[in-house]
Image: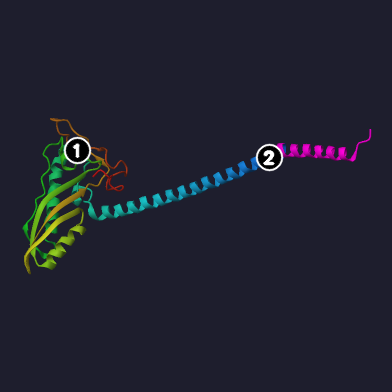
Amino acid sequence: MKLSPLTIILLGLSISIGVLSFALFHHYLPNKATTENLLTQVDLLKTEAGKQKRAEQRVLKAVEMVQLKADEWQAVVAAHTPPHGLGAGGIDLARNRWQLVIDARKFRNEVQRDLNRQLRRGGVTVENGPTIPFPSTSATNVVETYFNYPSIRFPVAIYDLGTVSVRGTFDQIDQHVRAWSTMPNYLAVTDGLRITGTSPNLLATYNLSLVAYIRGETVSPPVPEGAAPASGSGGGPGTPGFGGGGGGGPRGGPPPPDL
């Protein structure tokens, strides 16, 4: 049977369409979809990689900020906290509670001497000077009431001393008030400054608060009411407390935010 030219053309077109359809639906379109999916996945991976890089940069920035604040706090510790130990002018809270009753009064007297010395800065005359309060005489609560531990996560003595009055020239008063910001061994805060009188005889009044962070790594454990004092005056090993080997107090890092 002889095929006509038209039949041969139509047959060729049919075969071509079949081949193209097979290639289109079984190769081109699936490969195109796979390629698009792969490109989308590449974009997602690039996005995630960018996020990871930014996260790493944020971590590095956070570490730098923490170290900066730690360095700043260590500078405060070096200049504005009492020394460690009674002999150096501070206090050691690892000693037993009965000894701390005595030591806390000696520490209070040292703070008063430091305060009296600071009150004379600038050459002013003190008209009304504050008095540092005395600690408890009870071994059961001397740490809790005078050094605010553990109600605050590290021992700290806080003195709200009320109104101070000094007399002098304007320059003397100016130097006197500014000197509180550099008071050794303590953090001192003044507010409400008022100056009255006629120069050069001026009267300045202001409110004063004093904060003493206590250095160390352990605090003597509490004792029950009525318990007998331990033999000797020294303290045994204190229980792990605010420092815990260098943690949250003045010796190891910035104070927690609950002060």
Q: Is residue 148 above or below residue 172?
A: above
Q: Earlier in the sequence, mark 2 or mark 1?
A: 2
Disc 2 residue crowd, few under 14, some 14–19, many 20+, Cα 10 Å: few
Q: Magenta segment, which residues?
A: 1-25
What amino acid does circle 1 point to?
Asn
Does 217 sit left or right of 39 as displayed? left
User: Relative to the observer, which residue lies in front, 161 or 19?
Assistant: 19
Q: Residue furthest right?
A: 1
User: Relative to the observer, which residue lies in front, 118 or 99?
Assistant: 118
**SS for tag 2?**
helix
Q: Which residue is mark 1?
A: 96
Q: Is residue 91 above or below residue 232?
A: below
For the point 9% across and 63% down, the residue is 124
Q: Which residue is mark 2?
A: 29
What amino acid does circle 2 point to?
Leu
Rendering quarter of residue 103: top left
The percent position of residue 223, horizontal first and vertical second, equals 18, 33
The percent position of residue 96, horizontal first and vertical second, equals 19, 38
| Secondary structure mostly seen in the magenta stretch | helix
Disc 1 residue crowd, few under 14, some 14–19, many 20+, Cα 10 Å: many
Q: Determine which of the numbered discs, if any, sits on residue 47 in the image.
A: none
User: Relative to the observer, which residue lies in front, 118 or 257?
Assistant: 257
For the point 10% across and 46% down, the residue is 133
- Whether residue 233 is visible to the viewer of this picture, yes or no, is no
Rendering quarter of residue 42: top right
Does 232 sit left or right of 242 as displayed? left
The percent position of residue 251, horizontal first and vertical second, equals 28, 48
